[in-house]
Amino acid sequence: MKGLAVYPGTFDPVTNGHLDILQRGLEIFDRMIVGVAYSHRKNPLFTAEERVEMLRNVTREYQGVEIEAFEGLVINFVRSRNAEVIIRGLRAVSDFEYELQMALMNRKLAGNIKTVFMMPSAEYSFLSSSIVKEIFSLGKSVSCFVPDYVEQQLHTKFPHTR
Ligand code: ADP
């Protein structure tokens, strides 16, 4: 299918699970904009600029992908890019309630914008940026869960792991 979709998130940092969803999205849409939310409330480990830079680095070989930071409501960002589709990943039942609430609220706020959910490969169903940061900070390698470049950047935030 032709078209543009926005994949919003915090990406603190990007994991192989996020990349799995991005690749699946590219099988449906010919352009995807990854929207990196500032997410001040989540107090991210990496700045938005660092998260954008990591995503650009690890998606260099992908065709049709753009990475941009955004502030504020997802629907405003989606509209500003003339898109009508939001892609979100659904890992487990635990994601469902929050994602349903967000999707229905976004539909209320912007009726033409549609949310498309995609399931990652089973091996990434338990993976989150938070768990990656937690196990890495405790001295374990996360090389199965994030690209090498991201693991290198994690060392800069947790110098004791070098
Ligand atoms: P947010 O703050 O918006 O939840 P995240 O970076 O945690 O930002 O997640 C962005 C999107 O990617 C969400 O739809 C989330 O469900 C999805 N996602 C995160 N990790 C994975 C994963 N391992 N597999 C599939 N989807 C994922």
Image (cartoon, rainbow, N blue to C red):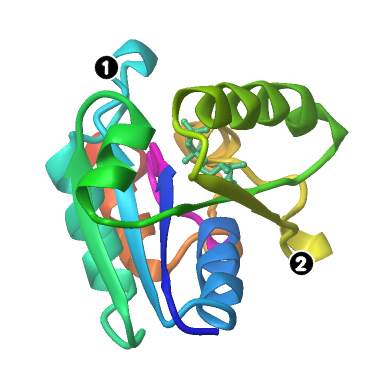
Main SS of the magenta part reads: loop
**Image-based side of 139 in relation to 20, left or right:** left
Alpha carbon distance from label 2 to label 1:
29 Å
Is tag 2's residue or tag 1's residue first in the polypeptide sequence? 1
User: Few, some or many C-alpha atoms within 10 Å of disc 2 (few <14, some 14-19, many ≥20)?
Assistant: few
The answer to if 119 sits in the magenta stretch is no
Residue at 46% over, 23% down = 109
Q: In the rendering, at what x and y percent does residue 81 appear?
A: 23, 54
User: Few, some or many C-alpha atoms within 10 Å of disc 1 (few <14, some 14-19, many ≥20)?
Assistant: few
Looking at the image, which is closer to me, 87 or 39?
A: 87
Label at residue 126: none
Q: In the rendering, at what x and y percent does residue 112 appear?
A: 49, 44
Q: Is mark 1 within 8 Å of ligand 1?
A: no
Q: Residue furthest left?
A: 49
Residue at 72% over, 61% down = 120
Q: Please, what is the three-letter code of the amino acid marked with disc 2?
A: Ser
Relative to 95, is 155 above or below? below
**The N terminus sits in image quarter:** bottom right
**Residue 159 visible in the snapshot:** no
Image-quarter location of ligand 1: top right
Residue at 32% over, 71% down = 58
Relative to 2, is 102 above or below? above
Residue at 25% over, 35% down = 46
Magenta stretch, residue numbers? 9-16
Q: Secondary structure at mark 2?
A: loop
Q: In the rendering, at what x and y percent does residue 150 appear?
A: 35, 58
